[in-house]
């Protein structure tokens, strides 16, 4: 499994400059302006050699901004542990997010799963505005065997003001996106749960010496190690798990669901996950 952020970095020749701009700019708005100028120049040069349409151009601007914000806010990637991912697959999609969701601020990435494939969502959370802006990418984003200019990347942008509805309309335009939207909303809802456990992990296991260096080394040594791992395609992730879930599920499962619960100390409602469970059968004589 590789990550869509790594694919963007590998497929766009300007990705390194975008990352530098967002890391060094005094403000996010300044970084967005400078990044747009970089992408504009690159697209103008490419257009002299390859046919590019307006949709491709607009997608590249949106991708650059999402990637840059992701870099600026610490490259946070949330991945569900296999047992939690399986439980989510057996859970009905949430109808709405809570009025005060305990979600991380800034931009982060969700690794999404459906039908044995992996999509992704870049999510920007503005707690003050009570808003989530999302950029969804499907599993075939930026394959290694095709250059960026030869593809029309499938990308969907949307904004959600919570606690408004997050039910996905049953329309032809969203048919291909529906499972990924539901996976994104379900994953976000899980991140609000108090029983959720998060710990840092790596996409590929690190050697013992590297683990020791990360635990006990100096800041420069740790930064160098992380940079080397990124060059090799390895990535730190935040692995989400929840105790008490089975490793696998039988064929007959009672679906999990979401319910609202009034807060004990505030008027805000909480979103409570009722996990799926195996159906029990009783024999009658």
Image: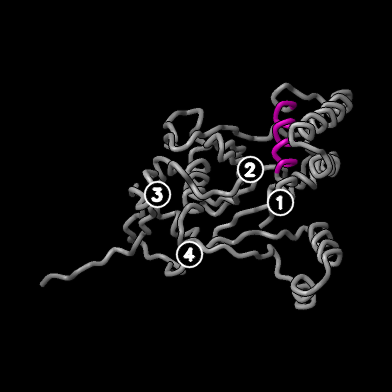
N-terminal of the pair, mark 2 or mark 1, is 1
Report if the CB atoms under discs 3 and 2 are less than 8 Å apart.
no
Where does residue 20 sit, x and y in percent of width and height? Answer: 84, 43
Q: Which residue is mark 2?
A: 122
What range of the chain is rendered magenta? 57-69
Neighbour tally class for label 1: few under 14, some 14-19, many 20 plus, Cα within 10 Å: some
N-terminal of the pair, mark 4 or mark 3, is 4
Closer mark to the observer between disc 3 and disc 1:
3
Closest to the observer: 72 or 182? 72
Where does residue 239 sit, x and y in percent of width and height? Answer: 59, 61
Dot 3: element: strand
Rounded to the nearest whole Å, what is the CA distance between mark 4 and mark 3?
16 Å
Rounded to the nearest whole Å, what is the CA distance between mark 3 and mark 2?
22 Å
In the figure, 274 relative to 129: above or below? below
Where does residue 256 sit, x and y in percent of width and height? Answer: 36, 55
In the figure, 2 relative to 58: above or below? below
Neighbour tally class for label 4: few under 14, some 14-19, many 20 plus, Cα within 10 Å: some
Q: Which residue is mark 3?
A: 271
In the figure, 218 relative to 107: above or below? below
Rounded to the nearest whole Å, what is the CA distance between mark 3 and mark 1?
27 Å
Examine the rendering and report whether any part of residue 12 can be seen.
no
User: According to the image, what is the colour scheme of the structure?
Assistant: one colour
Examine the rendering and report whether any part of residue 131 can be seen.
yes
Report if the CB atoms under discs 3 and 1 are less than 8 Å apart.
no
Rounded to the nearest whole Å, what is the CA distance between mark 4 and mark 1?
23 Å
Q: Which residue is mark 4?
A: 242
Closer mark to the observer between disc 2 and disc 1:
1
Q: Residue at x 60, y 39 (%)?
A: 136
Closest to the observer: 169 or 133? 133
Q: Give the main secondary structure of the magenta stretch.
A: helix
């Amino acid at each position: 499994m590789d990550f869509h952020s790594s694919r963007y970095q590998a497929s766009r020749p300007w990705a390194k400059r975008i990352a530098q701009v967002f890391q060094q700019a005094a403000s996010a708005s300044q970084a967005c302006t400078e990044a747009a100028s970089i992408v504009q120049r690159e697209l103008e040069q490419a257009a002299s050699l390859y046919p590019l349409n307006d949709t491709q151009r607009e997608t590249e601007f949106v991708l650059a901004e999402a990637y840059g914000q992701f870099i600026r806010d610490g490259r946070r990637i949330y991945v569900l542990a296999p047992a939690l991912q399986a439980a989510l697959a057996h859970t009905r999609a949430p109808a709405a997010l809570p009025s005060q969701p305990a979600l991380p601020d800034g931009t982060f990435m969700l690794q999404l799963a459906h039908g044995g494939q992996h999509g992704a969502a870049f999510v920007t959370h503005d707690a003050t505005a009570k808003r989530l802006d999302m950029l969804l990418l499907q599993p075939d984003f930026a394959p290694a065997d095709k250059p960026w200019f030869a593809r029309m990347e499938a990308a969907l942008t949307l904004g959600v003001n919570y606690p408004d509805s997050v039910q996905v309309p049953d329309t032809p335009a969203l048919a291909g996106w529906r499972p990924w939207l539901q996976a994104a909303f379900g994953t976000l809802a899980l991140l609000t749960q108090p029983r959720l456990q998060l710990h840092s992990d790596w996409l590929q296991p690190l050697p013992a010496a590297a683990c020791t260096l990360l635990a006990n080394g100096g800041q420069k040594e740790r930064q160098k190690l992380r940079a080397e791992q990124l060059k090799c395609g390895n990535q730190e992730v935040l692995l989400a798990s929840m105790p008490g879930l089975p490793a696998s599920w039988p064929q007959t499962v009672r679906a999990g669901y979401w319910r609202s619960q009034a807060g004990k100390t505030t008027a805000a409602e909480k979103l409570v996950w009722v996990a799926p469970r195996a159906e029990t059968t009783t024999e009658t004589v």
